Image: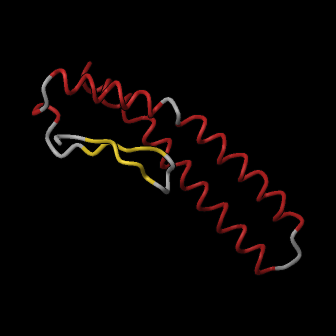
Amino acid sequence: MRYAFKHDERLGISLPWVPLEWEEYTSEERADMLLAWEEIRATIPDRILQLEAIIIEKTRQMSEEENFVRSCELNSEIHELASLINDLNIWFRVQQDHDTKVHQ
């Protein structure tokens, strides 16, 4: 297979696996890849909202937590969720960045 979309457990979405240079793909392959990516990309804002809701709940728990060790654990979990959101935002911009470069 010349390209694929593989599920990333950490991010909760499929990511492109594109081993060739963009120009090495046929226009049909590129169109298929872009369509598939747009469908995946469209799910990213909802995934971010899910993660933000978890962060809000963990922040609430942390504000009420009296056990220092558990508070530190919650803080680490919040940090990891924020990292996921950052990575998802980067992936969300991938198509925008490509479109910008193509039109320059």
Query: As drawn, is 53 to the left or to the right of 18?
Result: right
Where is the C terminus found, in terms of image quarters? top left
| Residue beneath the point at 52% across and 48% down | 86
Query: As drawn, is 42 to the left or to the right of 55?
Result: left
| Residue beneath the point at 76% across and 59% down | 58
Query: As drawn, is 103 to the left or to the right of 84?
Result: left
Residue 102, picture quadrant: top left
| Residue beneath the point at 17% across and 34% down | 22
| Residue beneath the point at 72% across and 68% down | 74
In the rendering, at what x and y percent does residue 82 appear? Answer: 60, 54
Where is the N terminus found, in terms of image quarters? top left
In the rendering, at what x and y percent does residue 26 appear? Answer: 12, 25
Pick out the residue farthest to the top: 103
Image: 92 above or below 6? above
Pick out the residue farthest to the left: 24
Residue 72, picture quadrant: bottom right
Query: As drawn, is 12 to the left or to the right of 60?
Result: left
In the rendering, at what x and y percent does residue 92 appear? Answer: 45, 36
In the rendering, at what x and y percent does residue 68 appear? Answer: 80, 79
Image: 81 above or below 29? below
